[in-house]
Amino acid sequence: MSFLKNIGVLPILIVLMRVLFGIGWLLAGVTKLIEKSWFKEPGLFLNEYLIDSLQNHNVPTFYKIFIENVVLEHVMIFNYVIPITQIILGLFLIVGLFTIPSILVCLFMHINFILSGNMNVISLILYTNAFTLIIFRKNIYHFSLDKFISLDTLFTINLNKREKNVSSPSKQKLTSNS
């Protein structure tokens, strides 16, 4: 890994991963709008998916309760929020705007997709990409709007930065008070 870092390839690979991750989320949202008719037949696809999830043995009991009592009760809200959020997050990740918060929201949504029984190779790859981007978060700001408008310092904690010690009163003040 240090070899990639020394020759400057690691930041380029991480930025490429961020952009591809964003494209994945953008396409997921656009696909829901175009192919699955989320807006032509609102709530139909999502309602059927959730009812099927209740029958799936891989879905934990607590999540089945959540699906029954919360999501199915508000299926129309989720019908519009999910694809629009995926499109916005995809665009944010592609241009590098609000990168860390976008990745965290993607992780939250991904956990919900996995808990609802949507376990496939693409889901696992996107989930792994999100964690990889968080691990290498110092490199995700190259070629991003976060860096351009200085948001990279807002979302990055610099652990190497030492706080300045509070200086003790100088000897002159002590001697002058005596």
Image: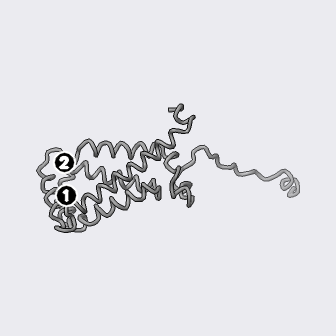
Q: Position of residue 74 (x, y in %)?
A: 21, 67
Residue type at mark 1 is Ile
Q: Which mark is residue 51?
A: none
141 versus 2 height, above or below: below
> Is 146 or 112 nearer to us in this picture?
146
| Left or right of 128 on screen, residue 138 | right
User: Mark 1 highlights which residue?
Assistant: 67
Name the quarter where the C terminus is drawn.
bottom right
Residue type at mark 2 is Val
Looking at the image, is mark 1 or mark 2 earlier in the sequence?
2
Q: Quadrant of residue 38?
A: bottom left
Q: Position of residue 80 (x, y in %)?
A: 26, 66
> Is 72 or 150 nearer to us in this picture?
150
User: Mark 2 highlights which residue?
Assistant: 59
Label 1 close to label 2 by CB (< 8 Å)? yes
- Residue located at (69% from left, 49% from top): 165
The figure's colour scheme reads one colour
Q: Position of residue 153 (x, y in %)?
A: 56, 54
77 versus 17 height, above or below: below
